[in-house]
Image (cartoon, rainbow, N blue to C red):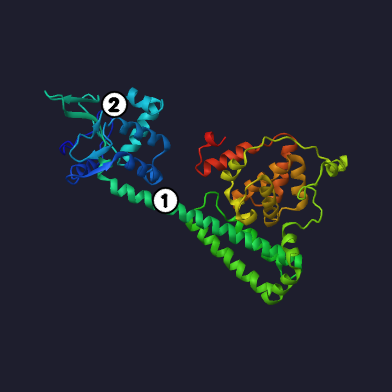
């Protein structure tokens, strides 16, 4: 790399002490140090939120690295790249000039590149008589070599935090499911206790779930749900409740899932003849066609519904609809509300809607009221599952274009 001269930016760009400090630090890279530039890039991509970068910033960084001919960043190599804005824009997938400059500034602020500006601000290289680059003006990517180990640690920490967040979310979902089902079971089995107050406590906890919760939020909320669970268990008087559960056998398990003995949307007719015997009154309101999506897309957008499928997985639409019945009961959605949704949207789309409501979790105060509102909008042709699924896919980090 080039020897440790500190330079200031060309034109009106200000110089800061942090910028000077970074330039000095790049002169202290250990002798013989090297790193794979794409490995460092992947680590920086993983840690982009910590570094304050956006997706476009990474596209610009990717383009900059493509102008460095070797895959390995070496301490003894020339680590300044000098593409023009036009060349850089082309390799960054046609990014606009103003946007390009903004994201270059973000990369500088993040400490991943350093400007090496010439006297007139142009980017170029001077070569010696042998044709080797003697001095270059452009963007110095040596900070990526200097911070290779740091970026790897940041990436590992971000990945660990993501796993911890996912587990905390799953644990909270399971705790909520358990509380919801126990309350339903206690009410339906006639267990003595102020279950209305317990229900209000549960709903109050759910309402406190932020739109974009942090790990600490999920942990604190889980603790509150677990405390509520302890109070419920005390009220249930486990000895009597367990014996009652045993005498009921499998009937109780089905009873939680479906309090209505003959819901037309939860038990499908076994033949076309039986379907034809339904009256016109029973079929109203008329089914409103809604665009359907592949099952794998639905499950990627709504992974939480999988926990309620047979044996903890969903392999086909029938299993999704079965899981939706369980979730419907857990969320406190009445059988009549779900039946109407099935008649208006179709059973598959109604099941997908329940999966979306489950995925949104605490952002919906009244799942039953929300489902009825969506059903009414579907009747008027004002509701589509597409934007909902796409938003959930984006939130989960899935590429929407490929998913659709």
Q: Nearer the viewer, residue 238 or 377?
A: 238
Q: Nearer the viewer, residue 5 or 316?
A: 316
Quarter of the C terminus within the rendering: top right
Q: Nearer the viewer, residue 315 or 320?
A: 315
**Quarter of the figure with residue 171:** bottom right
Residue 298: mark = none
Residue 366 coordinates in the image, percent (x, y): 68, 52
Taking 141 as reference, is 2 left or right?
Answer: left
Residue 83: mark = 2
Is residue 2 shown above or below 193?
A: above
Tell me what residue is drawn at x 74 percent, y 65 percent. Answer: 187
Tell me what residue is drawn at x 33 percent, y 24 percent. Answer: 87
Residue 286 coordinates in the image, percent (x, y): 80, 37
Instruction: Give the alpha-carbon distance from disc 2 to disc 1, as whole Å.
Output: 33 Å
Cβ–Cβ under 8 Å for marks 2 and 1: no
Quarter of the N terminus within the rendering: top left
- The residue that label 1 is drawn on is 159
Q: Secondary structure at mark 2?
A: loop
Residue 192 coordinates in the image, percent (x, y): 74, 72
Q: Nearer the viewer, residue 90 or 293?
A: 293
**Quarter of the figure with residue 16:** top left
**Residue 366 visible in image:** no
Residue 195 coordinates in the image, percent (x, y): 71, 66
Local crowd size for mark 2, using a 10 Å CA cut-off: few (<14), some (14–19), many (≥20): some
């Amino acid at each position: 790399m080039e020897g440790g001269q500190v330079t200031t930016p060309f034109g009106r760009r200000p110089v800061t002490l942090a910028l000077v400090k970074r330039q000095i630090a790049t002169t202290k890279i250990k002798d013989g140090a090297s790193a794979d530039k794409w490995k460092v890039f992947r680590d920086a991509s993983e840690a982009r939120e910590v570094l304050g970068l956006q997706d476009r910033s990474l596209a610009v960084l990717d383009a900059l690295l493509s102008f460095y001919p070797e895959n390995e960043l070496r301490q003894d190599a020339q680590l300044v790249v000098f593409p023009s804005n036009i060349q850089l824009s082309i390799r960054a997938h046609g990014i606009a000039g103003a946007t390009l400059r903004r994201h270059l500034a973000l990369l500088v602020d993040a400490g991943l590149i350093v400007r090496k500006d010439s006297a007139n601000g142009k980017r170029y290289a001077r070569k010696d008589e042998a044709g080797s680059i003697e001095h270059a003006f452009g963007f110095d990517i040596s900070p990526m070599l200097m911070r290779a180990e740091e970026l790897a640690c940041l990436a590992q920490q971000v990945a660990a935090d993501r796993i911890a967040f996912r587990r905390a979310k799953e644990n909270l979902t399971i705790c909520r499911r358990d509380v919801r089902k126990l309350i339903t079971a206690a009410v339906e089995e006639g267990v003595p206790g102020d279950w209305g107050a317990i229900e209000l406590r549960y709903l109050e906890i759910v309402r406190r779930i932020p739109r974009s919760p942090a790990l600490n939020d999920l942990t604190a909320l889980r603790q509150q749900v677990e405390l509520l669970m302890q109070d419920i268990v005390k009220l249930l008087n486990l000895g009597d409740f367990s014996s009652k559960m045993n005498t009921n056998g499998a009937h109780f398990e089905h009873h939680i899932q479906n309090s209505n003995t003959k819901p037309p949307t939860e038990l499908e007719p076994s033949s076309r003849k039986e379907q034809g015997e339904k009256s016109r009154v029973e079929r109203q309101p008329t089914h409103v066609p809604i665009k359907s999506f592949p099952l794998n897309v639905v499950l990627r957008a709504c992974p939480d519904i999988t926990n309620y499928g047979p044996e903890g997985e969903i392999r086909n639409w029938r299993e999704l609809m079965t899981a939706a019945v369980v979730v419907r009961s857990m969320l406190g959605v009445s059988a009549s509300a779900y039946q109407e949704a099935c008649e208006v949207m179709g059973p598959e789309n109604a099941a997908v809607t329940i999966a979306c409501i489950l995925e949104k979790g605490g952002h919906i105060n009244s799942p039953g009221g929300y489902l009825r509102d969506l059903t009414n909008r579907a009747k008027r042709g004002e509701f589509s599952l597409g934007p909902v699924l796409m938003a959930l896919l984006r939130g989960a980090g899935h590429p929407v274009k490929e998913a659709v």
